[in-house]
Image: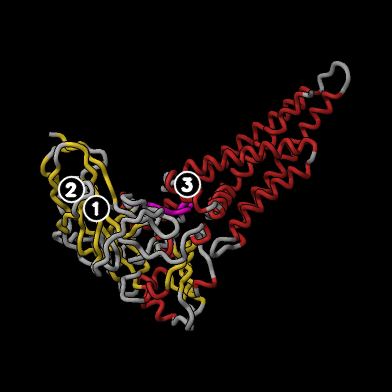
Amino acid sequence: MRTSRAWWPLAGLTAGALGLAVSYAAAALLHVRDSPVVAVAEGVITLTPGPVAKWAIDTFDTSDKKVLVAGILVVVALLFGWFGRLAHRRWWAAVTGYVVLAGTAVVAVLAKPTPSLIDLAPVVVGLLCWLVALALLAEWLRRWELAEDVPGPTDDALPTRRRFFAITGAMVAVSVLGGLAGRIAGNARRKAEQSRRLLRIEGVTAPAVPDGVAVDVEGVSPWQTPNDDFYLIDTAIIKPTIAPVDWEIRIHGKVERELRLTYADLVAREITEDWITLNCVSNEVGGDLVGNAWWSGVRLAAILAEAKPLPGADAVLQTSEDGWTCGTPLAALMDERNAMLAVAMNGVPLPIEHGFPVRTIVPGLYGYVSACKWVVDMEVTSFDDFTAYWTDKGWSAQGPVKIASKIEVPGDGAEVPAGELVCAGVAWFQHTGISKVEVQVDGGRWQPATLATTPNTDTWVQWRAVLDLAPGEHQLRVRAVDEEGRTQTGAIADVVPDGATGWHTIDVTASA
């Protein structure tokens, strides 16, 4: 076997790395978010079956998804090596592989809400680099093979080997430089973050936590969730970075009047502010995918009223800048609740991870049908006419929140002194409110807890109860009752298709 054959996978890998690096640099220079890796990765996320997507979101760090990106890069590297092997005997097969990979990226880019030809440029540049680089490396590998085929002693193989390795080294160096250039040029996030820090929005005020909302028990979640601690759920590999001057939203579809609003148009309108609790449909019973913040923005009811939805419209298909979609009941956006296009969170412009410069907030609905970050498009339509990201993966079309409560103090499995025990936590049922919380010990009678105050029905409420525990092991449960007298169900249900149910239950050991 000729030794040169073993280097064909290296040729494919080198050509692939060069194309990725050059496309990354091109994307950064052209201020395009979707380099081939990002475009393909987000396309994979979109096509991932619901249970797998939920597992990935629950498992990986949603703030950067480094593990997911690393996994995708490994798969792509293996494909590049395979393409190199194919090129040894079937050049057309290797070319086809690169074209299919680039085509996947093109489809992913075109699936974005407002694609343009410039968005495709990094993918095209990357494909050309793949093909040219592989052709060049293949040429020198074939010369190496021809030199080795010459019978008898010969030194002809030595210069071809050297030339192959020299070209390979040069391509590796260019790949590294391309990656560095892309990193330097890709300052979109830095620019967006700088514009965010300097932004001052008239009408946005700093939050003042109302009196009486906390039960003052150590270990209970702060009533106001700091921005850095607020849960994050999204599918974006790279968070969209949109400067306010570049942001625009289109409101169209089944309306009498299509609207286009720039950021300046939006913030020139009357600003509304409110305390609103958000929780994710993926939140397990007792989970922490819930938070409460002071949101500032412009009410959607007034904006949609200007567009004048047509008879028969009952939904709004929202689209994020990264292509994520959700379907929201039109009625929930136009009734008396404070549904808004939010521009600030806890008194400051939205953090990039939470949707800067504009996102949607709708009290009383799970985020998967309402909380569209980086929102750029709203199509007034009907639920019968579309599906959205999570509904394609098995979740229900409409997602009103369910009444929920959890025990935060003591923790599950804690050892506590026998006798009086302070038990505390939070409960929520946005847009309806909580009237009562009850705690149960070892299946006995339900004991009422004391509730803190709340400024409205759209926030969670803290509660505390004093229990009397005998020495030994005990099981504590909590349930809530809403403002209309409905009691939280104890029936256990998974998060799919429309949110988990059940009473949060913990075990403690009381020692004498």
Q: CA distance from mark 2 to mark 3?
A: 33 Å
Mark 2 and 3 residues: CB-CB less than 8 Å, in contact?
no
| Residue with the mark numbered 1 | 478
- Circle 1 crowding by C-alpha within 10 Å: few under 14, some 14–19, many from 20: many
Quadrant in which the N terminus is drawn:
top right
Q: Residues within 10 Å of mark 3 (few under 14, many from 20)?
A: some
- Marks 2 and 1 close (CB-CB < 8 Å): yes
Task: Find the magenta span and give its range.
Answer: 231-239
Q: Nearer the viewer, residue 316 or 146?
A: 316
SS state under label 1: strand
Q: Position of residue 126 (x, y in %)?
A: 64, 48
Disc 3: which residue: 56
- Amino acid type, mark 2: Cys
Q: Is residue 238 magenta?
A: yes
The amino acid on which the numbered mark 1 sits, given as a three-letter code, is Val
- Residue drawn 65% across and 50% down? 102
Q: Quadrant of the C terminus?
A: top left
Q: Secondary structure at mark 2?
A: strand
442 relative to 13 in the view: left or right: left
Q: Which residue is mark 2?
A: 423
Amino acid bearing label 3: Ala
The Cα–Cα distance between marks 3 and 1, rounded to whole angstroms, is: 30 Å
236, above or below 114, in the image: above
Image-quadrant location for residue 147: top right
Q: Earlier in the sequence, mark 2 or mark 3?
A: 3
